[in-house]
Protein backbone atom coordinates (compact mmCIF):
# COMPACT_ATOMS: atom_id res chain seq x y z
CA UNK A 1 0.00 0.00 0.00
CA UNK A 2 1.28 3.44 -0.89
CA UNK A 3 2.45 5.59 2.02
CA UNK A 4 -0.30 8.18 2.53
CA UNK A 5 2.08 10.86 3.88
CA UNK A 6 4.47 10.58 0.94
CA UNK A 7 1.54 10.58 -1.48
CA UNK A 8 0.12 13.77 0.04
CA UNK A 9 3.55 15.42 -0.17
CA UNK A 10 3.72 14.50 -3.86
CA UNK A 11 0.20 15.89 -4.44
CA UNK A 12 1.14 19.24 -2.92
CA UNK A 13 4.45 19.22 -4.81
CA UNK A 14 2.57 18.85 -8.11
CA UNK A 15 0.09 21.58 -7.18
CA UNK A 16 2.69 24.13 -6.09
CA UNK A 17 5.27 23.36 -8.77
CA UNK A 18 8.34 23.52 -6.52
CA UNK A 19 9.79 21.80 -3.46
CA UNK A 20 10.23 25.18 -1.75
CA UNK A 21 6.55 26.12 -2.05
CA UNK A 22 5.47 22.58 -1.16
CA UNK A 23 7.61 22.68 1.98
CA UNK A 24 6.04 25.99 2.97
CA UNK A 25 2.51 24.65 2.39
CA UNK A 26 3.22 21.47 4.37
CA UNK A 27 5.21 23.19 7.12
CA UNK A 28 8.21 21.00 6.27
CA UNK A 29 11.78 21.55 5.17
CA UNK A 30 12.70 21.38 1.50
CA UNK A 31 15.02 18.37 2.11
CA UNK A 32 12.07 16.67 3.82
CA UNK A 33 9.93 17.11 0.70
CA UNK A 34 12.72 15.75 -1.49
CA UNK A 35 13.14 12.77 0.84
CA UNK A 36 9.42 11.94 0.63
CA UNK A 37 9.66 12.12 -3.17
CA UNK A 38 12.63 9.73 -3.28
CA UNK A 39 10.91 7.28 -0.94
CA UNK A 40 7.72 7.37 -3.00
CA UNK A 41 9.72 6.76 -6.20
CA UNK A 42 11.34 3.81 -4.48
CA UNK A 43 7.98 2.45 -3.39
CA UNK A 44 6.43 2.62 -6.88
CA UNK A 45 9.67 1.71 -8.66
CA UNK A 46 9.52 4.55 -11.16
CA UNK A 47 10.82 8.10 -11.64
CA UNK A 48 8.03 10.54 -10.90
CA UNK A 49 9.45 13.92 -11.99
CA UNK A 50 11.87 15.30 -14.54
CA UNK A 51 13.80 18.33 -13.34
CA UNK A 52 13.96 21.35 -15.62
CA UNK A 53 16.13 24.14 -14.23
CA UNK A 54 14.63 25.18 -10.91
CA UNK A 55 11.33 23.48 -11.69
CA UNK A 56 10.12 20.08 -12.79
CA UNK A 57 7.47 18.28 -14.82
CA UNK A 58 5.84 15.00 -13.79
CA UNK A 59 6.68 11.89 -15.81
CA UNK A 60 3.91 9.68 -17.18
CA UNK A 61 4.11 7.64 -13.96
CA UNK A 62 4.10 10.89 -11.98
CA UNK A 63 0.94 12.13 -13.71
CA UNK A 64 -0.83 8.85 -12.98
CA UNK A 65 0.22 9.00 -9.33
CA UNK A 66 -0.77 12.68 -9.09
CA UNK A 67 -4.26 11.85 -10.38
CA UNK A 68 -4.55 9.04 -7.83
CA UNK A 69 -3.44 11.38 -5.04
CA UNK A 70 -5.98 14.03 -6.06
CA UNK A 71 -8.76 11.43 -6.26
CA UNK A 72 -7.94 10.12 -2.78
CA UNK A 73 -7.80 13.65 -1.42
CA UNK A 74 -11.24 14.46 -2.86
CA UNK A 75 -12.69 11.20 -1.53
CA UNK A 76 -11.35 11.90 1.95
CA UNK A 77 -12.65 15.46 1.86
CA UNK A 78 -16.09 14.23 0.79
CA UNK A 79 -16.08 11.63 3.57
CA UNK A 80 -15.16 14.23 6.18
CA UNK A 81 -17.94 16.48 4.93
CA UNK A 82 -20.50 13.67 5.16
CA UNK A 83 -19.38 12.77 8.66
CA UNK A 84 -19.69 16.39 9.74
CA UNK A 85 -23.12 16.77 8.18
CA UNK A 86 -24.15 19.08 5.38
CA UNK A 87 -23.07 22.34 6.98
CA UNK A 88 -23.00 25.25 4.47
CA UNK A 89 -20.35 26.99 6.59
CA UNK A 90 -17.92 24.08 6.75
CA UNK A 91 -15.80 22.30 4.16
CA UNK A 92 -14.18 23.33 0.92
CA UNK A 93 -15.22 24.89 -2.37
CA UNK A 94 -12.97 25.18 -5.42
CA UNK A 95 -13.96 27.37 -8.36
CA UNK A 96 -12.25 27.95 -11.71
CA UNK A 97 -13.03 30.90 -13.97
CA UNK A 98 -11.44 33.49 -16.23
CA UNK A 99 -9.13 36.06 -14.69
CA UNK A 100 -11.53 38.91 -15.43
CA UNK A 101 -14.51 37.15 -13.84
CA UNK A 102 -12.32 36.32 -10.82
CA UNK A 103 -11.75 40.05 -10.25
CA UNK A 104 -15.46 40.49 -9.52
CA UNK A 105 -16.16 37.10 -7.96
CA UNK A 106 -13.15 37.12 -5.62
CA UNK A 107 -14.27 39.96 -3.30
CA UNK A 108 -17.71 38.37 -2.97
CA UNK A 109 -16.25 35.01 -2.01
CA UNK A 110 -13.90 36.68 0.46
CA UNK A 111 -16.82 38.50 2.09
CA UNK A 112 -18.69 35.20 2.36
CA UNK A 113 -15.72 33.26 3.79
CA UNK A 114 -14.47 35.91 6.24
CA UNK A 115 -16.97 35.16 9.06
CA UNK A 116 -16.81 31.37 8.42
CA UNK A 117 -13.45 30.01 9.69
CA UNK A 118 -14.35 26.40 8.85
CA UNK A 119 -14.99 27.23 5.19
CA UNK A 120 -12.10 26.78 2.75
CA UNK A 121 -12.31 28.63 -0.57
CA UNK A 122 -10.13 28.15 -3.66
CA UNK A 123 -10.59 30.53 -6.59
CA UNK A 124 -8.31 29.92 -9.56
CA UNK A 125 -8.08 31.93 -12.76
CA UNK A 126 -7.50 29.47 -15.57
CA UNK A 127 -7.91 29.03 -19.35
CA UNK A 128 -11.25 27.63 -20.48
CA UNK A 129 -9.85 24.19 -21.32
CA UNK A 130 -8.16 23.91 -17.94
CA UNK A 131 -11.44 24.74 -16.20
CA UNK A 132 -13.18 21.88 -18.02
CA UNK A 133 -10.34 19.50 -17.16
CA UNK A 134 -10.40 20.70 -13.56
CA UNK A 135 -14.11 19.99 -13.18
CA UNK A 136 -13.73 16.54 -14.77
CA UNK A 137 -10.87 15.67 -12.39
CA UNK A 138 -12.77 17.14 -9.38
CA UNK A 139 -10.01 19.72 -8.85
CA UNK A 140 -12.78 22.31 -9.29
CA UNK A 141 -16.24 21.90 -7.81
CA UNK A 142 -17.64 24.57 -10.11
CA UNK A 143 -16.43 26.43 -13.18
CA UNK A 144 -17.48 29.45 -15.24
CA UNK A 145 -16.99 29.29 -19.01
CA UNK A 146 -17.76 31.39 -22.08
CA UNK A 147 -19.27 28.43 -23.96
CA UNK A 148 -21.15 25.22 -23.30
CA UNK A 149 -18.48 22.49 -23.21
CA UNK A 150 -21.02 19.94 -24.51
CA UNK A 151 -19.41 17.15 -22.49
CA UNK A 152 -21.47 14.13 -21.37
CA UNK A 153 -19.98 14.20 -17.86
CA UNK A 154 -20.52 17.91 -17.34
CA UNK A 155 -23.72 19.72 -16.43
CA UNK A 156 -23.75 23.23 -17.94
CA UNK A 157 -26.26 26.01 -17.29
CA UNK A 158 -26.36 29.47 -18.93
CA UNK A 159 -26.21 32.14 -16.23
CA UNK A 160 -25.90 35.34 -18.24
CA UNK A 161 -23.55 37.20 -20.49
CA UNK A 162 -20.93 39.89 -20.25
CA UNK A 163 -20.08 42.68 -22.62
CA UNK A 164 -16.78 43.03 -24.44
CA UNK A 165 -15.47 46.56 -23.97
CA UNK A 166 -13.15 48.82 -25.95
CA UNK A 167 -11.29 50.67 -23.21
CA UNK A 168 -9.65 54.09 -23.52
CA UNK A 169 -8.28 56.62 -21.04
CA UNK A 170 -11.04 58.66 -19.45
CA UNK A 171 -10.15 61.87 -21.30
CA UNK A 172 -9.68 60.26 -24.74
CA UNK A 173 -11.79 61.15 -27.76
CA UNK A 174 -13.87 58.54 -29.53
CA UNK A 175 -11.78 56.92 -32.28
CA UNK A 176 -12.86 57.77 -35.82
CA UNK A 177 -11.56 54.46 -37.17
CA UNK A 178 -8.87 51.84 -36.90
CA UNK A 179 -6.18 54.39 -37.82
CA UNK A 180 -6.93 56.31 -34.62
CA UNK A 181 -6.57 53.12 -32.57
CA UNK A 182 -3.39 52.14 -34.41
CA UNK A 183 -1.89 55.52 -33.69
CA UNK A 184 -2.64 55.20 -29.99
CA UNK A 185 -1.45 51.58 -29.81
CA UNK A 186 -2.88 48.47 -28.15
CA UNK A 187 -2.15 47.37 -24.60
CA UNK A 188 -1.94 43.70 -25.44
CA UNK A 189 -2.59 40.66 -23.27
CA UNK A 190 -2.92 36.90 -23.96
CA UNK A 191 -6.52 37.18 -25.23
CA UNK A 192 -6.23 40.60 -26.88
CA UNK A 193 -6.05 39.47 -30.53
CA UNK A 194 -8.99 37.08 -30.14
CA UNK A 195 -11.15 39.64 -28.34
CA UNK A 196 -10.21 42.32 -30.88
CA UNK A 197 -11.47 40.14 -33.73
CA UNK A 198 -14.73 39.50 -31.86
CA UNK A 199 -15.39 43.16 -31.05
CA UNK A 200 -13.66 45.24 -33.72
CA UNK A 201 -14.57 43.02 -36.66
CA UNK A 202 -18.31 43.86 -36.57
CA UNK A 203 -17.68 47.55 -35.75
CA UNK A 204 -14.79 48.66 -37.96
CA UNK A 205 -14.87 47.93 -41.70
CA UNK A 206 -11.09 48.39 -41.90
CA UNK A 207 -10.18 46.11 -38.97
CA UNK A 208 -6.94 44.41 -40.11
CA UNK A 209 -7.16 41.44 -37.74
CA UNK A 210 -6.11 41.15 -34.12
CA UNK A 211 -2.64 39.91 -35.02
CA UNK A 212 -1.94 43.07 -37.07
CA UNK A 213 -2.81 45.68 -34.49
CA UNK A 214 0.06 47.89 -33.39
CA UNK A 215 0.97 46.94 -29.86
CA UNK A 216 2.32 49.58 -27.52
CA UNK A 217 2.66 47.38 -24.45
CA UNK A 218 1.96 43.78 -23.40
CA UNK A 219 0.69 42.85 -19.92
CA UNK A 220 0.13 39.27 -18.76
CA UNK A 221 -1.64 39.80 -15.41
CA UNK A 222 -5.36 40.52 -15.75
CA UNK A 223 -5.44 42.94 -12.84
CA UNK A 224 -2.62 45.01 -14.36
CA UNK A 225 -3.96 45.30 -17.92
CA UNK A 226 -6.09 48.44 -17.36
CA UNK A 227 -3.33 50.33 -15.52
CA UNK A 228 -1.34 51.62 -18.52
CA UNK A 229 -4.58 52.64 -20.25
CA UNK A 230 -5.58 54.58 -17.13
CA UNK A 231 -2.19 56.32 -17.36
CA UNK A 232 -2.89 57.39 -20.95
CA UNK A 233 -0.98 54.60 -22.68
CA UNK A 234 -2.89 52.98 -25.53
CA UNK A 235 -6.22 51.15 -25.44
CA UNK A 236 -7.33 47.60 -24.83
CA UNK A 237 -10.26 45.19 -25.02
CA UNK A 238 -11.51 43.28 -21.99
CA UNK A 239 -14.71 41.65 -20.77
CA UNK A 240 -16.82 43.95 -18.62
CA UNK A 241 -15.77 42.08 -15.46
CA UNK A 242 -12.14 43.00 -16.10
CA UNK A 243 -13.13 46.68 -16.03
CA UNK A 244 -15.67 46.78 -13.23
CA UNK A 245 -13.28 44.80 -11.03
CA UNK A 246 -10.34 47.12 -11.75
CA UNK A 247 -8.97 49.56 -9.21
CA UNK A 248 -8.45 51.99 -12.12
CA UNK A 249 -12.11 52.02 -13.17
CA UNK A 250 -12.61 55.76 -12.48
CA UNK A 251 -9.79 56.64 -14.90
CA UNK A 252 -11.10 54.49 -17.76
CA UNK A 253 -13.76 55.05 -20.40
CA UNK A 254 -15.75 52.46 -22.36
CA UNK A 255 -16.15 53.43 -25.99
CA UNK A 256 -19.72 53.11 -27.34
CA UNK A 257 -19.87 50.96 -30.48
CA UNK A 258 -22.72 50.46 -32.94
CA UNK A 259 -22.65 46.67 -32.61
CA UNK A 260 -22.41 45.47 -28.98
CA UNK A 261 -20.71 42.10 -28.53
CA UNK A 262 -21.31 39.87 -25.53
CA UNK A 263 -19.77 36.62 -24.32
CA UNK A 264 -22.12 34.07 -22.75
CA UNK A 265 -21.46 32.82 -19.22
CA UNK A 266 -21.99 29.15 -18.37
CA UNK A 267 -21.84 27.56 -14.93
CA UNK A 268 -20.50 24.00 -15.02
CA UNK A 269 -20.12 21.11 -12.60
CA UNK A 270 -19.96 17.33 -12.72
CA UNK A 271 -23.21 15.84 -14.00
CA UNK A 272 -25.16 13.74 -11.52
CA UNK A 273 -23.23 14.98 -8.52
CA UNK A 274 -25.29 15.92 -5.50
CA UNK A 275 -23.90 19.27 -4.41
CA UNK A 276 -23.55 19.96 -0.69
CA UNK A 277 -25.17 23.09 0.67
CA UNK A 278 -21.92 25.10 0.71
CA UNK A 279 -21.64 24.63 -3.07
CA UNK A 280 -25.26 25.64 -3.50
CA UNK A 281 -24.32 28.87 -1.72
CA UNK A 282 -21.26 29.27 -3.96
CA UNK A 283 -23.45 28.77 -7.01
CA UNK A 284 -25.73 31.54 -5.79
CA UNK A 285 -22.79 33.92 -5.39
CA UNK A 286 -21.60 33.08 -8.90
CA UNK A 287 -25.07 33.63 -10.34
CA UNK A 288 -25.43 36.97 -8.55
CA UNK A 289 -22.06 38.11 -9.96
CA UNK A 290 -23.09 37.06 -13.46
CA UNK A 291 -26.41 38.88 -13.07
CA UNK A 292 -24.60 42.13 -12.28
CA UNK A 293 -22.66 41.83 -15.52
CA UNK A 294 -25.72 40.85 -17.51
CA UNK A 295 -27.67 43.88 -16.32
CA UNK A 296 -24.88 46.41 -16.84
CA UNK A 297 -25.25 48.78 -19.77
CA UNK A 298 -22.14 50.54 -21.08
CA UNK A 299 -21.95 54.22 -20.31
CA UNK A 300 -19.11 56.11 -21.87
CA UNK A 301 -17.55 58.80 -19.68
CA UNK A 302 -19.15 62.23 -20.08
CA UNK A 303 -15.67 63.70 -20.41
CA UNK A 304 -15.16 61.94 -23.74
CA UNK A 305 -15.88 64.11 -26.76
CA UNK A 306 -18.32 62.57 -29.22
CA UNK A 307 -17.71 62.18 -32.94
CA UNK A 308 -19.31 60.07 -35.64
CA UNK A 309 -17.42 57.82 -38.03
CA UNK A 310 -18.50 56.17 -41.24
CA UNK A 311 -16.09 53.31 -40.48
CA UNK A 312 -18.00 52.32 -37.35
Image (cartoon, rainbow, N blue to C red):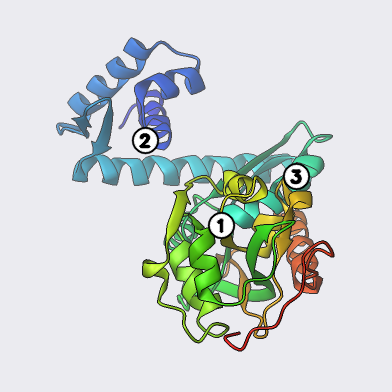
Q: Which residue is mark 3?
A: 107
Instruction: Provide the residue designation for mark 1.
Output: 98
Query: For residue 210, what is the image quadrant?
Result: bottom left
- Secondary element type, mark 3: helix
> In the visual, does 83 lie left or right of 304?
left
Q: Is 303 on the left or on the right of 153, as rendered?
A: right
Q: Residue at x 24, y 20 (%)?
A: 39
Disc on the earlier residue, 1 or 3 = 1
> Height in image: 133 above or below 196?
above
Using the numbered discs, state the Cα–Cα distance from disc 2 to disc 1 in whole angstroms: 22 Å
> Compared to 95, does 144 lie above or below?
below
Q: Secondary structure at mark 2?
A: helix
User: Considering the image in quadrants, where does the C terminus appear?
Assistant: bottom right
Q: Nearer the viewer, residue 254 or 39?
A: 254
Asked if residue 137 shows in the view, the reply is no
Q: Which secondary structure, mark 1? A: loop
Amino acid sequence: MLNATWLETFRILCRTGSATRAARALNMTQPGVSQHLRKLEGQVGAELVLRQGKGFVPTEAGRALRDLAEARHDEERALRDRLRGDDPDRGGMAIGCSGSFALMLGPRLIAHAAPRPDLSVTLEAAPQRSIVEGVLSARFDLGVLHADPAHPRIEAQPIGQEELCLILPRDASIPGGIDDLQERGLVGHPDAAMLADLLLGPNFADHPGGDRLRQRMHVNQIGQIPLPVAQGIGWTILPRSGIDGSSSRDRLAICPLPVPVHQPLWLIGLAGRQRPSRLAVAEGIIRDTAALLDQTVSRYSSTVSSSDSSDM
